Amino acid sequence: MNKYLTLSETAELTGKSKGTLRRWDREGKLPAHREPISNYRLYNQEQVELLFGDFLGESGQEAKGNAVEAEHEYTVVELFAGAGGLAVGLERSGLKCVALNEVDTSACQTLRNNRPHWTVLEGDVRNFDFSQYHNNVDVVTGGFPCQAFSYAGKKLGLADARGTLFYEFARVVQQVQPRICIGENVRGLLSHDNGKTLQGMISILNEIGYRVMPVQVLKSTQYNVPQKRDRLIVVGIRKDIAVNYEYPKPYKKIYTLQDALKKGELFDCDVPVSGGATYPESKKSVLDLIPPKGYWRDLPLDIQKKFMGKSFYLGGGKTGMARRIGWDEPCLTLTCSPAQKQTERCHPEETRPFTVREYARIQTFPDSWQFHGSMAQQYKQIGNAVPVNLGTEIGYSIIAFLNSYYSVLQKGVQR
């Protein structure tokens, strides 16, 4: 039986834009089939893999993977740690977290409950001094919020960022002097304030002694995560270090919602039962009419207009509204609230939002990782997290860099 890929899945697999794939469909270079009800483009997976075989062979790393063993004990200080998605991933790769800072009380309790041996620094990062880790830590990481800052004079310097959380990230990097620092953020940082915010951050890291590698956006679906979640990565290497950093190579296999919630390659059992949010009856009656992989345009016209209100006439796809996820596709990006109107993520068979444990599975948290706080706080912690499996792949890339650095350092000492 032929397996079909959606337009998004084909774009993820091939690295081509949706616009290019639509044009190729019109030109007959890579014709798509049309789904009878929604008229979505569907691509024959065998045909796609045949056409892009050479490309996929170069980019996919299924045989060997990115896994690499740490040749020494490498240590990390993490800022804005949240519920630990990145930290757990880094731990899995072989890095040791020596301190984690987080301001949210519930998230801090989550970290402490799951890892009693971790040093959790609860509170505003502005109130902590990290000089005790000076020259004793290999890595500083942080998912700092994206904030613009003013540009006094021609140089986009550290002083111009004062009062923002990126300033605190840079301050800690300057205090600790790690071999490498890793900042992560949403893709939107690329265009924030016409790119000036990102350029300012790069300028500041350069000012404090770090050369910044070319910024990349990593697609989580290419790193064993069953979710379409892009993360922008900013990597700074201390200027006295000549070794370059290489981003983790993508895998060609794309995992789906079924892989997340059912027993298979990602998890060795079905998702545990847990509590979850519910839809009000008015929304449930609408979503009952949506097929898997469908959204509000699959509703009868009169219900579309009533459900969407003024948004119906504003144009644009708004494909996240009244959206039911399909078993055979990666989930759309999870948000902090699973039932809000703009970003519904409805279960493929039952008319309900994903439960807390389903949310955690989609973010590739282990089932043993328990979240503290109210249900709303748990959803928020999970929705804000870096997917654990993506964190693991980033961790391997850091280890590869540090292995090279210490190897060069040791050779220099021996001479």
Image (cartoon, rainbow, N blue to C red):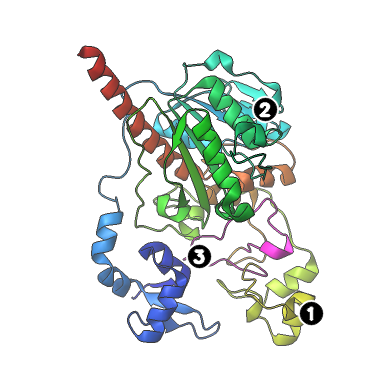
User: Residue 306, which numbered label?
Assistant: 1
- Residue 23 is marked as none
> What amino acid is at disc 1?
Lys
Q: Earlier in the sequence, mark 2 or mark 3?
A: 2
What is the chief secondary structure element of the magenta stretch? loop
Using the image as rendered, state which of residue 224 and residue 52 is in the foreground: 52
Residue 413 at x, y percent in the picture: 25, 13
Tell me the residue at 38%/20% (across/down): 73
Residue 189 placement (x, y as % from top left) = 58, 50
Read off the magenta span: 321-346
Q: Is 331 a magenta residue?
A: yes
**Residue under label 3:** 327
Q: Disc 2 marks which residue?
A: 125
What whole-number distance in Å separates the C-alpha atoms at marks 2 and 1? 46 Å
Q: Quadrant of residue 75?
A: top left
Q: Is residue 163 left or right of residue 133?
A: right
* Residue at mark 2 to residue at mark 3: CA–CA distance: 41 Å
Q: Amino acid at mark 2?
A: Val
Secondary structure category for the residue under label 1: helix
Q: Is residue 57 above or below residue 317?
A: above
Quadrant of the snapshot with the N terminus: bottom left
Confirm whether residue 113 shows in the render: no
Mark 2 burial class by Cα count in 10 Å: few <14, some 14-19, many 20+: some
Nearer the viewer's eye, disc 2 or disc 1? 2
> Disc 3 residue type?
Trp
